[in-house]
Amino acid sequence: MTPFDLWAAILKAPFSGDVQVNQEIQPRFWSSDLKGIPEIEDRIQTEVASFGKQLGKIIEALLVLSHEAGIKLDEIEKINAEVAEVKKNSKEAIRAEAVDALERLRKVDEGAWRQVIGGDRA
């Protein structure tokens, strides 16, 4: 045991706690090396489609066209499969978290639990 171990539970370095850290990536508004108009880029990402959604549609179209042309795009197919796997695993994890949250709610407030699951329309 070191002296640091005594303080580790109290003092936490940035981004080291038990809180998930999310980073929003947005264009740098005043950067001279940015292409396009930042205000428009921001609106597209927030109101229309994220970069991932946009790239997904492009990859989907590219794969359809490549299959029709008889061209094999191994790297693009691999990326597409990996993205699909991450989405599948994420959905399963989110579902499991929701099930756990509902079970906790049932234990502490069964009336609220019934309302959430649709069993008791108040």
Image (spheres, rainbow, N blue to C red):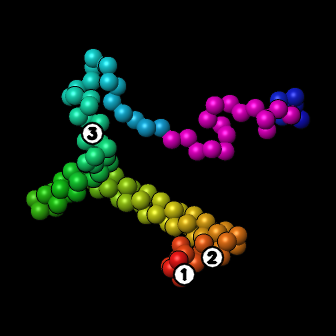
Label 2's element?
helix
Whether the residues at callouts 1 and 2 have beta carbons within 8 Å, the answer is: yes
Local crowd size for mark 1, using a 10 Å CA cut-off: few (<14), some (14–19), many (≥20): few
Q: Is residue 79 above or below residue 117?
A: above
Q: CA distance from mark 1 to mark 2?
A: 7 Å
Whether the residues at callouts 3 and 2 have beta carbons within 8 Å, the answer is: no
Where residue 3 appears, x then y in whole percent? 87, 28
Residue 70: tell me if it is visible: no
Outermost left residue: 69
Q: Report the residue at 68% width, 30% height from top.
A: 13
Q: Residue under label 3, please give it.
A: 43
Horizontally, residue 42 falls left or right of residue 109, namely left
Q: Residue under label 1, please give it.
A: 120
Label 3's element?
helix
Q: CA distance from mark 3 to mark 2?
A: 41 Å
Q: Residue under label 2, please give it.
A: 111
Horizontally, residue 74 falls left or right of residue 116, namely left
Check residue 20 for magenta coloring: yes
Outermost top residue: 32
Q: CA distance from mark 1 to mark 3?
A: 40 Å
Nearer-N-terminus badge (3/2): 3
Q: Is residue 26 above or below residue 115?
A: above
Check residue 104 for magenta coloring: no
Where residue 38 appears, x then y in whole percent? 27, 29
The span picked out in magenta is: 6-22
Between circles 3 and 2, the one closer to the viewer is 2
Front in this rendered view, residue 60 or 23: 23
Q: Report the residue at 44% width, 57% height from top.
A: 86
Q: Report the residue at 67% width, 71% height from top.
A: 109
Between circles 1 and 3, the one closer to the viewer is 1
Callout 1 amino acid: Asp
Nearer-N-terminus badge (1/2): 2
